[in-house]
Image (tube, helix red, strand yellow):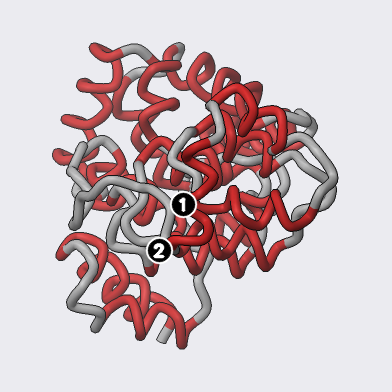
Amino acid sequence: MLKAELLIFVKKLAADMSSLPEYDMMVSLLGHRLAELEPTEAALVLNAFYDKIVEHLLKLRKAKAAISDPKDLIAAIGEEKGRLIYLASLELGLNKVGRLFTDLPPHKKGLSGYDTEEDAKMEFITLGERRALSKGWIKDKLDRLLSDPDPMVIANLLNNPRITEKEIIKIAAKRPNSPKIIRLISTHRRWGMRYAVKKALVQNPYTPPRISLGLLESLFLQDLKEAAKDGGLHPQVRHAAKERLEEKE
């Protein structure tokens, strides 16, 4: 458990972060506050986001979204300060914080693109037209764009009110998929918070491990068990799922 002084700091930090409407704002605030701390203190604060007692006490669920893509957090902290926090986490034995700063490639790589011959016809439409269509209301066109490889098309779909969770899960589960598109989903202010979307991202071997490791914390027992034994996932993701299971049991 955190010392009283740091516990107060985390409580204030979580409250301030949760009051912000956008992911980027939360990441910026977290990065700024961590940058002001000594590396050891910053590592302990980050570890609090993984401590189930502290999480329950301080209601960190919304604020925790800020570590769904550690790449953004490291950019906000600064590379050098991030390196020092990482080293401090190793000295303190804070494995989850250490993994947060470990950049690993996805377990599988591949080019994203259209899945079916029918949908692939969209590639004959110019990129500008596809981006315009992704903001529109024609459901048939929107459905065909779910496999589009262009991140801006997908970003438009994520914000399109005609798109439902079912379609977002389809994008999140797509294999192969690009890290940029995975990141757009995991950090989205609406869809990134949905349990079924998080689960689909963790189960996708094309999801960067940094993102999967952050999302694992939200999974229920049965889904953690599946992740722990899924040979298609990155070894670190499977190992982290096993650790999380041990904490829950």
Left or right of 208, for residue 188:
right
- Answer with left or right where residue 232 lies relative to residue 154: left
The secondary structure type at the circle numbered 1 is helix
Which residue occupies the foreground of this view, 151 or 114? 114
Q: Where is residue 67 in the image (x, y as percent from the top left)?
A: 47, 40
The reply to whether residue 154 is visible in this rendering is yes
- What is the distance, in whole Å, between disc 1 and disc 2 at their CAs? 27 Å
Residue sitting nearer the eye, 114 or 49: 114
Whether residue 57 is visible, yes or no, is: no
Name the amino acid type tagged 2: Val
* Residue under pointer 2: 202
Whichever of labels 1 and 2 marks the residue nearer the N terminus, that label is: 1
Name the spot of residue 245 as percent of width and height, x first: 36, 79
Which residue is disc 1 drawn over?
120
* Looking at the image, residue 17 lies above or below residue 39: below
Crowding near pointer 1: few (<14 within 10 Å), some, many (20+)? some
Residue occupying the point 24% across, 46% down: 99
List x then y, in percent, for residue 181: 46, 41
Q: Which residue is drawn at 26% across and 35% down?
A: 101
Secondary structure category for the residue under label 2 = helix
Tell me which amino acid carries mark 1.
Ala
Specify the quadrant of the image occupied by residue 125: top right
